[in-house]
Amino acid sequence: MLEKLFNKLADDGSAEFIYLIIGSLLLFVYQRVRSAIRQFGARRKLRNDLSAYLERKGAINVIDIANGDPEFAKSNIFVREVTNFGRPKSLFISMSDEHQAKLRSRQIEAGYGTHQCTCFQPDESFNGSGDFSELAVITDIADLPILIEKHRIIVSEKFVHGTDGMMFNGEKYGVFNLRFTRFGFNEAPGVELDLFHTDYFTHRVFRSIYQELKGAGHPIAQASVENFLQYRPFFTSFGVNALLICEGERGREIVLGKRSARVHGSSARYHVTMNEGLSQTDKDAFGRVDLELCFKRGLLEELGIDDKLYCLAKRSAFYDFFLERNNLEIGLSAVFELDVGFAAEIEPLVARDKAYEADGFETLPLKHRPIRDFVGQNEFVPHGLYVIEHVLMREGISISSIGKAVV
């Protein structure tokens, strides 16, 4: 029957037409199958990328507080010290008397002059008293005063023996309040940053308390944009974290610092180029706290970039306020770009903290693949990886592989 039909079609000269129809059908089926395979592959890649992003975000454990769009202009950042009846609002935890005596005795035996011995402020809470019970009310952590006494001793012991990177007790600023706003028809982002006085010893005591609370599963470890200011006594530090971009033999390059184990007491890890904490030295001629002065001081002390080089900057900008939940600290991401080569012009410069805080530097072409590969193969300070990622996003580069963020 079929043979007769095909013979008839052949006799009628229609065989070519049938073959054309069959070929078209086969081509259509092939294209549909190919399209389905491509869609499946694209969906799987999207799922993998999303899973990688969420895994990386969870490993970094840093959340956005506010993002500059495209940046926070320096003229739209207002920094001020909070006061109590004319006195700076302060939060100090003093080293125990026993440990102060041990430290002072050791320093005198080493030949320190009286003026060179480490000093500690007496206990002072936000309300000006030496009683920390108000902090329990502010944070809703009922046993916080007890924890302060416990960790005062723990940190005092480390300080006396110079372990875990504890070498000196300098003045610092903590963050009492953050308020974000918009300016003008373009709705340019702005911020009001209110500060309290504190010191490094107090900072380490609250960091130690936080680690205990986090280990016990306390809600503070999941602080969010909505409630983070409830825990303001823990914000005893505020840091500017900058990524340096230079002009090298391979074109534009980013510069990564390898953070020394001497700074944080663990293994050396890659970080941003410069990380500097805001302090009482960062004031202008009128006595006002200036975030840009902190930025400039960090570039000078960690890289040797002085005012002359700073004035040659192609670009400098503040980008994102973030909450780092590994140690519960607030930070600000930034970028600084110069049209000079790092190896030839900047790396040889002498800087006060360069040898102590960094084991070295790594330059990478400002291109997707080499950066992605390097991030995937090396260990990073968690919030350093966050800053690198957010600066690079503004350069049109996305890091798709998971960096090894190590707390």
Image: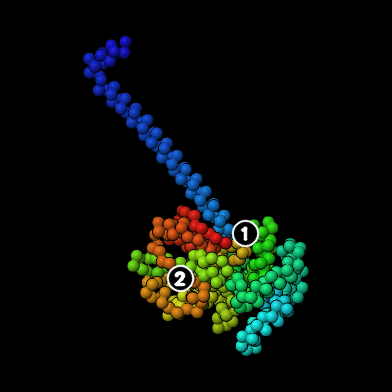
Front-most of residues 329 and 381: 381
* Residue furthest front as drawn: 109
Q: Residue at x 69, y 70 (%)?
A: 154
Are the two marked residues, 2 and 1, in contact with CB atoms closer than 8 angstroms?
no
Amino acid type of the residue that numbered disc 2 sits on in the rendered structure: Gly
Q: What is the crowding at mark 2: few (fewer than 14 residues within 10 Å), some, or many (at least 20)? A: some
Where is mark 2, residue-wise? 360
- The N terminus, quarter of image: top left
Amino acid type of the residue that numbered disc 1 sits on in the rendered structure: Val
**Label 1's element?**
loop
Measured as percent of width and height from the top left, residue 236 is found at 64, 70
Whether residue 136 appears in this view of the structure is: no
Q: Is residue 250 above or below residue 170?
A: above
- The C terminus, quarter of image: bottom right
Measured as percent of width and height from the top left, residue 310 is found at 44, 76
N-terminal label among 2 and 1: 1
Where is mark 1, residue-wise? 225
Q: Quadrant of residue 20?
A: top left
Colour logic: rainbow
